[in-house]
Image (cartoon, grey):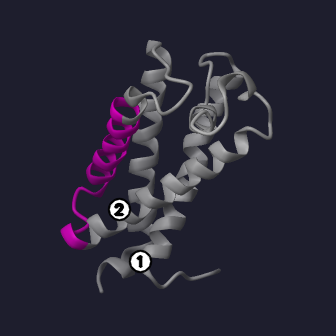
Amino acid sequence: MIELKDKLTFGAVAGMIANIFKNAFIFGLYFFDVIKYTTWHMASSSYISKDRINTLGSLIPGAVTDYFMASIMGIIIMYLLYFTGKENYIFKGVMVGLFYWVAIYGIVMSLEITYINPDDLITNLSQIVAHLIIGSLTAFIIVKYGSGLLEE
């Protein structure tokens, strides 16, 4: 097994692993026609017009953006836990996840930087749940598998 020995890399990887589960949730809703757009669609719409957003190639910028943002979230949670301790780590992860949701869906999308700005209740609620998943799971992965890095 590969052992990551620095906080930044471990946090980034933890965020990307948690993002897999977030995306499984979101794509599950998308494939069952519960939501119209995934996180990748919305992220890609910053770079690609809405009328071309449903092609596979157009989702690549969205996927890269999504995993980059997840890695930054992981780094933030890693250092938050390092400086504040492991106590209530799930709560701390949830708070960072919700901060991301507010920052992205409440602030950035209201600036109309993206071509897609979902205004339906189910998409917004699903994104709240998705950010709860990624925040809490990232914190769990860090504490479960990287707690040695938190004690240095």
> Is residue 122 depicted above or below 146 in this figure?
above
Amino acid type for the residue under numbered disc 2: Ile
The secondary element bearing badge 1 is classed as helix
Q: Residue 83's x, y, as percent?
A: 22, 72
Which of these two is toward me, 83 or 56?
56
Identify residue for label 1.
7
* Mark 1 or mark 2, earlier in chain: 1
Q: Residue furthest top?
A: 120
Q: Residue 126's x, y, as percent?
A: 48, 26
Q: Quadrant of the C terminus?
A: bottom left
The secondary element bearing badge 2 is classed as helix
Q: Residue 38's x, y, as percent?
A: 61, 30
Q: Residues within 10 Å of mark 1 (few under 14, many from 20)?
A: many
86 part of magenta stretch: yes
Q: Quadrant of the N terminus?
A: bottom right
Amino acid type for the residue under numbered disc 1: Lys
> Is residue 91 depicted above or below 37 in this figure?
below
> Is residue 22 depicted above or below 29 in this figure?
below
Q: Residue at x 30, y 43 (%)?
A: 99
Q: Is residue 75 visible?
A: yes
Range shown magenta: 83-107
Q: Residue at x 34, y 30 (%)?
A: 106
Q: Which mark is residue 76?
A: 2
Q: Residue at x 45, y 68 (%)?
A: 11
Which of these two is toward me, 89 or 128?
128
Q: Residue 3's x, y, as percent?
A: 56, 83
Q: CA distance from mark 1 to mark 2?
A: 10 Å
Overall secondary structure of the magenta stretch? helix
